[in-house]
Image (tube, rainbow, N blue to C red):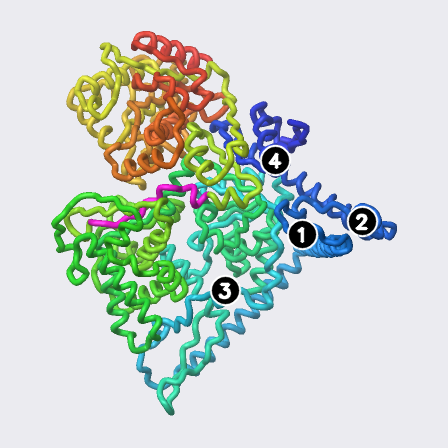
Amino acid sequence: MADKTEEAGGVHFPFPFTPYAIQKDFMAALYQVLEAGKIGIFESPTGTGKSLSLICGALSWLRDFEQKKQEEEERLLEARADPLNDGKGQAPCPPPSCQQSPGSPRAAGEPDWVTQFVQKKEERELVDRLKEGQVRRKKREERLRQIRHNASLKFAAKRMRQEDEETERLLRLSREMLAAGSGPEQLAWGEDELVLAEYESDEEKGSASGLDADEDDLEEEHVTKIYYCSRTHSQLAQFVHEVQKSPFGKDTRLVSLGSRQNLCVNEDVRKLGSVQLINDRCVELQRSKHEKKSVVEEEKPGRRRRLEPRATCPFYNHKQLQLLRDEVLLEVKDIEQLVALGKEARACPYYGSRFAIPAAQLVVLPYQILLHAAAREAAGIRLQGQVVVIDEAHNLIDTITGIHSVEVSGSQLCQAHSQLLQYMERYGKRLKAKNLMYIKQILYVLEKFVTVLGGNVKQSPNTQSLSQAGTELKTVSDFLFESQIDNINLFKVKRYCEKSMVSRKLFGFTERYGAVLAPSREQPKLSGFQHFLQSLQPGVTAAPAAPAEEGEDRALRPASPLMHIEGFLSALTTANQDGRVILSRQGSLSQSSLKFLLLNPAVHFAQVVKECRAVVLAGGTMQPVSDFREQLLACAGVEAERVVEFSCGHVIPADNILPLVICSGPSNQQLEFTYQKRELPQMMDETGRILCNLCNVVPGGVVCFFPSYAYQRQVHAHWDKSGLLARLAVRKKIFQEPQRVNQVEQVLLEYSRCIQLWAGCFLQHCGQAGGMVTGALMFSVVGGKLSEGINFSDNLGRCVVMVGMPFPSIRSAELQEKMAYLDQTLPRAPGQVPPGKALVENLCMKAVNQSIGRAIRHQKDFASIVLLDQRYARPPILAKLPAWIRDRVQVKATFGPAFAALRKFHREKSGSS
């Protein structure tokens, strides 16, 4: 369909088709937020074209911003070049990005000639900067134009790559011939790489840019851009495809970012498996390229030995990266296309995409790169004056908390201590004094961590039984004091680990000589950041259901325990009031753990909102938004006036959805699924009777959500025993959400086939289904694998049932500490619910909103939503539902009227469809 230009709020928005009215409103509101430099919270239900609205609204603003900036720059340059303007008239006003801030020093009472001199000097510098920017922009445009229209450049670059590879091959053969004549070594071949280099100082010795002097032209000035981030790579790829189909797809310079694990094309590095090992190996290869190393080393007086030259990455080359960078900017590509291009060009997509960031207009990246300061710095992301759009932001607070929370087990602590102790014994005489000092400090810290759990590093963690069991929470300061490491400067230890790469050396040591302590078969705990990285990988989960085979275990082996413990040490440098340490003692030392819990996610989000021009939080279900305002934005120092909320309705007609709150069942049993009542036999029986009635009148698929896996299993077993399950199976084929991730796709496929088979029979019999099976019933769990990101559109989800309210366990020590923290830190107005209690309600309703959002996926879709619990009828709870559902919800005190409304709704909709 031909592109169309729509006008909303006086702004022209190119769009691939005629947009809905709510899309026009969305784009206009988004444009105003970006123009005014606000923080926007945007809610647009699934199926309303949110992605396209974000793309066309944000890129329309960027188009106008760039045009205004270019016109202002040209006006300034013309005014400066005008011979009639000799300084007697009014000086030209610099563009907003170059204006002097109100707080800039300007001494009072200065002579006029001094003021004029300073002003003219600033004007000259401004004009020089503008001219330089124009030159750089023209060079980039000319370079991209040549690549676009001159294929011979690509062939020339490919020929040069082949020549370089042949040269490298000959050099490698020569080195091997020279190495063959070397004398006996005191260390085994390659073992010198395991020895720590001299650690000279705690001070910075300069920035390691990873670039040679002749590679400076890979760096460009950062233009104003939009950073778009979402949770998974599949969501990012979908967004990129939407950009490709949009009116901006041909002219937008887009860069897709990912981790080394996703982008690395060096098979020798990829096979390491672990995210941390891949990162460290890549950094080491870059250091090998840029550090000058002597070919010979003095080992004894009068005796010299030849060192094996260190390997470098063949995909990290200036000319190759320059070509890849320009190819990335030339046309929109997703991660898979970027990797394919990197393999073809024999250039690293990881670094090539990062070198393209400065000139990019739209950067697409996962959550963890943007939300983690160290990852931002490593990627070369500069947020000053830029725009950030965070999609699927409903779980943003939990994401930040998870990324910055770390847990280490007793077995990991003991294993790291044993490995590091043997490493020191092996290479102690070769290490410098500062290396030994820091290694001894790390050993001391590890020993004290084990001691505070009640164990002993000299014994196996699997055989150590702890005298005390239970969970204990402490402030960071109290934990450091109890562990007797309050006299250790953890900032210096953290810096030493980063600079010396001791954990990578230790991993190489254990790889060479075997594991010191055989790890237990339990899945090693991952830090929040590592867990999040792993969750982004398709088909890879944090806790596989079945143990891996020998080969698989090696392919996906975790990093050394010290690598993981470094994350815990780093977390302990967080401000005392912003986090807690949880000591979990579980019978044996190997099962016990230390966990850092982040209480204040705003401390990590503050820098983002402070530096950015504007930030947009978008999602299909953002309600309740009070969490974002209070826990994230207000605590990050954002004034209430800067926050703008936008929520639009759905594109479906009002009569295509029937949301019901049912307060009692067919036998007048009051529905209130509290922890005390939900396990009562009469409550489970009443729930079964309700479902039997629903399945009699709802065609196609019914998705029923339970609060937890345990309760789902309990209800399923009770119904099986009482015969209710057999009654349900007469009308619907029953499916259960599997707990194994690798089984989800198969279950969904069978569920879909069952409904398609019913639909085919239904059409053949002209709607006369009789007593046959009328579809399928899926038992799911709130917060499980089917409650987010799964599409139950059309016949797959004609009715969504919520059994009870999925409140988090109030007995959780982490939740109790979070509630106490909010009660102490957040202000409470008279008559308001305490912040801690509001947190529990909000967590519950966010989970509910995500689950019921699985249905109604497009304009012609229809479904009923049944909330089984009388507590849903309370006004404060109803207010937390999405507006497009809240405005249409019907509260039924008894089951009879509710059943009649459901039967009428589905009879009319099924007949019309």
- CA gap, disc 2 to disc 4? 28 Å
Mark 2 element type: helix
Q: Left or right? Give the position of 460 relative to 38.
A: left
Q: Nearer the viewer, residue 786 or 219?
A: 219
Q: Amino acid at mark 1?
A: Ala
The numbered mark, 2 or 1, whose residue comes first in the sequence reads 2
Mark 2 lies on residue = 78
The quadrant of the rendering that contains the N terminus is top right
Query: Which quadrant of the figure has residue 496?
Result: bottom left
Query: Which quadrant of the figure has residue 29?
Result: top right
Q: Residue at x 60, y 27 (%)?
A: 24
User: Is residue 600 within the magenta segment?
Assistant: yes
Q: Is residue 433 above or below residue 42?
A: below
Q: Left or right? Give the position of 101 relative to 717.
A: right
Q: Nearer the viewer, residue 9 or 275?
A: 9
**Contact, CB < 8 Å: mark 2 with mark 3?**
no
Q: Label 4: how many residues lie within 10 Å, few (<14), some (14-19) or many (20+)?
A: few
Q: Amino acid at mark 2?
A: Glu
Mark 4 lies on residue = 36
Mark 3 lies on residue = 208
Q: Nearer the viewer, residue 751 or 101?
A: 101
Q: Residue at x 68, y 50 (%)?
A: 108
User: Is residue 622 within the magenta segment?
Assistant: no
Mark 1 lies on residue = 107
The numbered mark, 3 or 4, whose residue comes first in the sequence reads 4
Q: Label 2: how many residues lie within 10 Å, few (<14), some (14-19) or many (20+)?
A: few
Q: Is residue 884 above or below residue 501?
A: above
